[in-house]
Image (spheres, rainbow, N blue to C red):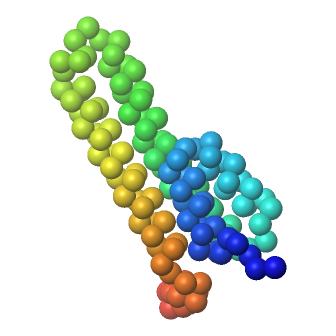
Amino acid sequence: MKEVWTQKFKKAFIWASGLISFIAFAIVGGYTITKSEDEELKKTSKTAFIVTLVFLAIEAILFIISAFGSMGANYYNSGLYDFHTITTKIVSVAKYIVYAVFIILSLCLSPKQEKSETTSEK
């Protein structure tokens, strides 16, 4: 029987789940790491995990800044609020760009191209 999900679509699904939410990625990536026998999928899942953690940490830091700032009397008219707003927008746009690039790369690169790139780096 022909396999419906190719390796390219599986990799794109892993990246898309990381973009959707951390919980969705935990389910998809965790299943891939524990149950999959394909080393390329495990490598993709681990890379997506690191990228997801980086964005999660940045968003957590911005949330803490916002929480502490909102305890102040004049937070919403301060420069800290402007910094938080601009930084949150920049991080959000960067997150979508990074995930879009990785999804496009996972769909466009064939497994032969990926293997030749890794062997040429060594």
* Image quarter of the N terminus: bottom right
Is 25 in front, or is 71? 25
Residue drawn 39% across the image and 53% down it: 96
Q: Can residue 122 be seen in this view?
A: no
Residue 91 image position (x, y, % from top left): 34, 46
Residue drawn 45% across the image and 59% down it: 99
- Count the labels in the image: 0
**Farthest-out residue, top:** 73
Residue drawn 27% across the image and 33% down it: 85
Q: In which quarter of the image is residue 39?
A: bottom right
Q: Left or right: where does residue 6 sit relative to residue 71?
A: right
**Farthest-out residue, front:** 1
Residue 40 image position (x, y, % from top left): 66, 74
Q: Left or right: where does residue 68 sit relative to residue 115?
A: left
Residue 28 image position (x, y, % from top left): 67, 54
Q: Left or right: where does residue 118 sit relative to residue 27?
A: left
* Image quarter of the C terminus: bottom right
The answer to whether residue 38 is above or below residue 85 is below
Residue drawn 24% across the image and 38% down it: 86
Q: Can residue 36 be seen in this view?
A: yes
